[in-house]
Image: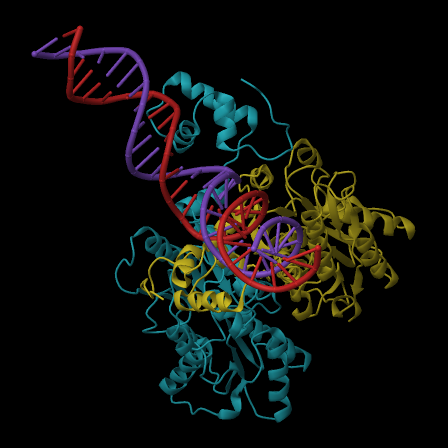
Chain colours: A yellow, B cyan, C purple, D red
Amino acid sequence: MTSSRRSAEKPATIYDVAREAGVSHQTVSRFLLGYQGIRPATRRKVEEALETLDYRTNITARNLRNGRTGMVSLAIPSLNQPYFAELAQSVIHAAREVGLTVFVETMENDKERELAVLSGTRGNLVDGVLFAPTAMSVDDLSRLKIGFPIVLLGDRIFDSGFDHVAMANSEGARAAVEHLIGLGRRRIAVVGVEPPRNLGAAHLRFTGYRDALDAAGIEFDERLALGGGGWIKDDGVHAIERLIASGTPFDAVFGFNDALALGALRGLLRAGLRVPDDVAVVGFDDTQDALYSTPTLTSVAPGREEIARIAVGLMDRRLKGQSSAGGPQEFQADFHLVARESSLG
Amino acid sequence: MTSSRRSAEKPATIYDVAREAGVSHQTVSRFLLGYQGIRPATRRKVEEALETLDYRTNITARNLRNGRTGMVSLAIPSLNQPYFAELAQSVIHAAREVGLTVFVETMENDKERELAVLSGTRGNLVDGVLFAPTAMSVDDLSRLKIGFPIVLLGDRIFDSGFDHVAMANSEGARAAVEHLIGLGRRRIAVVGVEPPRNLGAAHLRFTGYRDALDAAGIEFDERLALGGGGWIKDDGVHAIERLIASGTPFDAVFGFNDALALGALRGLLRAGLRVPDDVAVVGFDDTQDALYSTPTLTSVAPGREEIARIAVGLMDRRLKGQSSAGGPQEFQADFHLVARESSLG
DNA sequence: CCGGGGTTCGTTATCGATAAAATCGACGCT
DNA sequence: AGCGTCGATTTTATCGATAACGAACCCCGG
């Protein structure tokens, strides 16, 4: 029991502990890993030494030896977007349940950075990637050779070759618009439209919008399709200001996410329009913002918790199962429409 | 040039590259680290081999050897709170500028988990911790022996012995309340009050509130001090509902954060009160939510970007400077009040 | 009383990188 | 020609953990 080593100095290793306990480092390792074949006397010596030296296992060393880190990265556009911040929290929670740690990486809607995440530059730091791209195309994705498990999040991409947890983008959008139609609205503006170049939430939600219109026999009016910006609140404000300025009549707005819808809401109210009396508003994502706006915002809840849980589950299975555990899996989370004041009054 | 190794198999190591190039692994390492003393011919062979084998450096191995990871953890309550989500994004950005990577860890206002972060359980995975505790006390903090740099975020703690980047909590709160007083309000309710047991944003903001009242010669009315819950929107709603139910007259509300203020706003509007005509509302944090509520929310902007930048800078200095680069540093970010519709009309 | 089998523990090898020390040549100078 | 010097590379050691293997010791039966 040579209680050496000053306290705040270099952390103790298993070798230090072994010396302190008068055993071999391997015995210490065995103890730490919970092996059974250790005599009570030895066990006690090791326990004491661990205590005296305040041993902490060096995770980096373990990771190197094991070839795994137990971390997965969650690659999203930005934590400034409430939906993704909340998704991140849900994923962190779900991962914790299965013993994984989440490394949050933000890509800022930048194609280069999205590609960088998959290039494995951060190689061996994480075992896999939960990937929610917005800028890159399906082609970009399939062109890459990737050496670790990937689970795609959020959009409906078929045949990407990867596991994929989708929101019910088109179905949810359709439900939102049908809700508006059911309330007697016919001139439904849509905010957040994008050219169909990317991985596609915008495209899919637009499809849902069109489907609902078609089903109700309402003709699509191009002037009601607003886009050109990003998907943050400002874009919603600007879009609705342009629409109002254009003089095009409308009695409802469907925003492709809550931020856009809330921006639109803001623009409407500032222009003196009443919500929902003059214009009903519906969003998508059901973020906390939707719950506390005035009026509260009707929104499509995409099943964030479920998405997180399934995605983490898929990743976990890939990581555990040797090599590839079967072909790519597709999941779609259940959604539901949460009707609130912005459409019901 | 024995182009061996199948593509998607185990990633190539420097040894593989060395064999491919016909040199020693050390030469490869030198090349990768940018050493000068390498003959052009050798250099070319290495470059080719790296290319052929699609080499990626194993960060875990490098970390083990170097004893550092280049990662710092940002420990916050939750990404579900917009202020912290936005702070996280700012910190990630600031860290990237100085070549650090951020690992976001959420502690859920749980004292155990806050302590766990500092216990170094995650030892050697990060080089330091940017720490924004809410549940533990100053005593808890000083009781711990900690083996890595820490920078405290957000509250004004003196003599903690650690670097610390503070918001202007009391000053900001005082400015908010003075703003209300300047508008002729005298019955100013305050939401988010807590017993002064923890590290203290609540306490400090309350102090600012009292200071402003005192300076204006307004007597403090205990019935206007609302607390008992957390700091999320629901708590704001409930607090304001209780206040209204109590019949206590009031003409303004100061929420200790935007979430509380927006919750209060929501409660007021639902109760049929007009904002700001009947009741003016001011929040704290200046999150994006404040910008897009209706009415828009007056709020204290605590200088989030600056806080992030300074905190990362302090951490960077500690990590670079051997051992301890001087005593603990205290910083306080500049704040400013952003007056919007909820107080100006 | 000796040998087989099981427990307990120690020795050596390994993960993939970087650092320090050693080697090998070519070159210049006396 | 002999020798020191410098530059380019290779060899060996190291970070801290886990895995594989082997040695020492015990118990027990024949």
Q: Is residue A78 visible?
A: no
Q: At 79% across and 47% down in the image, what residue appears?
A: A330
Q: Is residue A249 above or below residue B233?
A: above
Question: In the picture, residue B82 is in which quadrant?
Answer: bottom right
Query: In the rendering, at what x and y percent does residue B140 appear?
Result: 42, 76
Which quarter of the image is occupied by the C terminus of chain A? bottom right
Camera-side residue of A238 and B214? B214
Q: Is residue A214 left or right of residue A2?
A: right
Q: Is residue A62 visible?
A: yes
Camera-side residue of A258 and B24? B24
Camera-side residue of A329 and A27? A27
Query: In the rendering, at what x and y percent does residue A122 appear?
Result: 53, 42
Q: Is residue B45 above or below residue A157?
A: above
Which quarter of the image is occupied by the N terminus of chain A? bottom left
Q: At 42% across and 47% down in the image, what residue appears?
A: B97
Number of on-image labels: 0
Q: At 76% across and 67% down in the image, what residue appears?
A: A276
Q: Is residue D8 left or right of residue B8?
A: left
Question: In the picture, residue B309 is in which quadrant?
Answer: bottom left
Q: At 74% across and 45% down in the image, what residue appears?
A: A163
Query: In the rendering, at what x and y percent does residue B101 appear?
Result: 47, 50
